[in-house]
Image: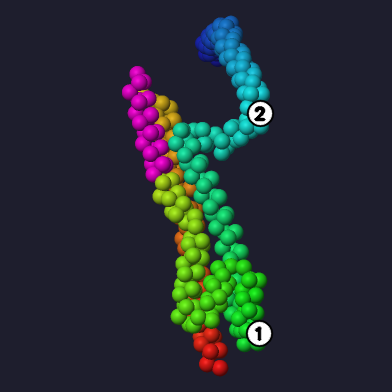
Amino acid sequence: MAQKKRPSSGLIVLLTLAAILCFAIAAAHSQESAATAPPAQTAVSGQDSLGMAKGDSMSIVKKIDDMKEHARLGWFYNVRYSGLGDFFVRGGVFMWPLLLCSVIALVFIIERLFTLTRARVDVKNLMNHVSQALRSEGIEAALKVCEGTRGPIAAVIHSGLLRAAQGPEAVKEAIETAGSIETSFLERGLVVLATVSTIAPMLGFLGTVSGMMNAFAAIAAAEQVSAKIVASGIEEALITTIAGLTIAIPASIGHAFFVSQIERFVLEMEEASANLVNELVELNKK
């Protein structure tokens, strides 16, 4: 039995020596890796530090430039570097005529809204007062009622009453003449709105062509084409198109709205004029 155990004990010794050798090799490898790692980390950290230093210096320079620009522009600095101001600058030179179109359209829209709102009156109530004044006190009282009422309809009725003594035909002629004058007054400014709604998209499309030309010029000048080179020209093209349509759409809507309101005024003037002529005819019969 003792002779059979000896080979197994030698095998155990060999396995033990092999394990010790493997452990020693692993330990040596780990020490070698640890020895070589710090230089690489040092190089990477050195590059990171250099990059951070460059980034900090660039940010400092940018802050100084911003401070100089702010001192030079004053209050306009906030407008220039706001979202809308930056959008305007990136749109290129054609944004200036588009800005002029937008200001003109806005002024005429506000002016027409104010004028047509003040011209609005209750036609039925006005004609009732005019009829009562004609029947009770005569033409002079009816004229005073019209003079105390603002708007084109009262002006048309007033013109007809001034010719009441000359008969219904003279009244009709006076009403037609006054109606034409008042209609022209109501339509004032609509031609400008129609022009802006037509020109603004054209200016936007012209800016689109200019932006595309700049994009192709940048492509031709660059040795290596990249999306960044083309992006500024395409952005200019899209911005001017958006601006032109943004101006034209409200101007067109305002023009259509005002035309409908003026047509309503014309119908009310015709109705009031017919009622006045009928009232004068009835009074003459009496």
- Colour setting: rainbow
The verdict on residue 215 being magenta is yes
Magenta residue span: 202-224
Q: Amino acid at mark 2?
A: Gly
Q: What residue does disc 2 label? A: 74
Q: Amino acid at mark 1?
A: Glu
Residue at the far front in the pictured view: 166
Main SS of residues in magenta = helix
Residue 280: where, in percent of width, then height?
A: 53, 85
Looking at the image, which residue is at 35% across and 21% down?
221
Residue 265's place in the image compared with 134, above or below, is above
First of labels 2, 1 by sequence position: 2
Q: Is residue 224 visible?
A: no
Tell me if label 2 and label 1 are in contact, CB under 8 Å: no
Q: Is residue 164 visible?
A: yes
Looking at the image, which residue is at 48% across and 62% down?
184
Residue 10's place in the image compared with 242, above or below, is above
Circle 1 crowding by C-alpha within 10 Å: few under 14, some 14–19, many from 20: few
The verdict on residue 205 being magenta is yes
Looking at the image, which residue is at 53% across and 52% down?
108
Q: What residue does disc 1 label? A: 137
Which of 42 and 166 lies nearest the eye of the viewer? Answer: 166
Mark toward the viewer: 2 or 1: 1
